[in-house]
Image (cartoon, grey):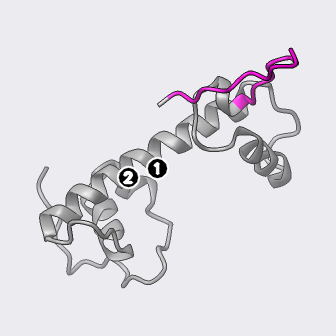
Amino acid sequence: MPRTRQSSRRGSSSRRSRTDRAELTFSVSLVEHHLRESGHARRLSETVPILVTAILEFLTRRLLELASNEAQRLGAQRLITPEILDLTIYNNALLSEMFQFTTISQTAPAGPRRRRRQI
């Protein structure tokens, strides 16, 4: 949903943040700050933080959508727990590969006892 900005009556310039211009929810400035502080890249173009922010936002939305579907399937219609999030990642082949070295706190580690759901 695009954000709209009320213009001022005094005729000031209508400055919009990069987040607003890119129609994103996550803060582009915050992502840029973390990219610069991490030290992985010496120089960043102006578009890199916007692209990384868009990718993070997309992955977050997709993961929450899949977790919501999983929660509804399991009967917990309104609550996405860390266990459901872990199960969602484990059951999705692409997400499972992407997060293979990530530990989700407050859950038991996904071991060989779990069976993959056929997609």
Q: Which residues are magenta?
A: 2-18
- CB under 8 Å between discs 1 and 2: yes
Tell me the crowding category of disc 2: few under 14, some 14 to 19, or many 20 or more residues within 10 angstroms, Cα based. Answer: some
Give the residue at x 56% y 35%.
54
What amino acid type should be assigned to the residue bearing mark 1? Thr
Tell me the crowding category of disc 1: few under 14, some 14 to 19, or many 20 or more residues within 10 angstroms, Cα based. Answer: few
Query: In which image quadrant can residue 82 be found?
Result: bottom left
Disc 1: which residue: 60
110 over 89 or under it: above or below: below
13 over 66 or under it: above or below: above
Cα distance in 3D space between marks 1 and 2: 5 Å
Query: In which image quadrant can residue 89 be found?
Result: bottom left
Disc 2: which residue: 63
Q: Position of residue 30 (x, y in %)?
A: 75, 47
Give the residue at x 27% y 58%.
68
Q: Position of residue 11 (x, y in %)?
A: 86, 14
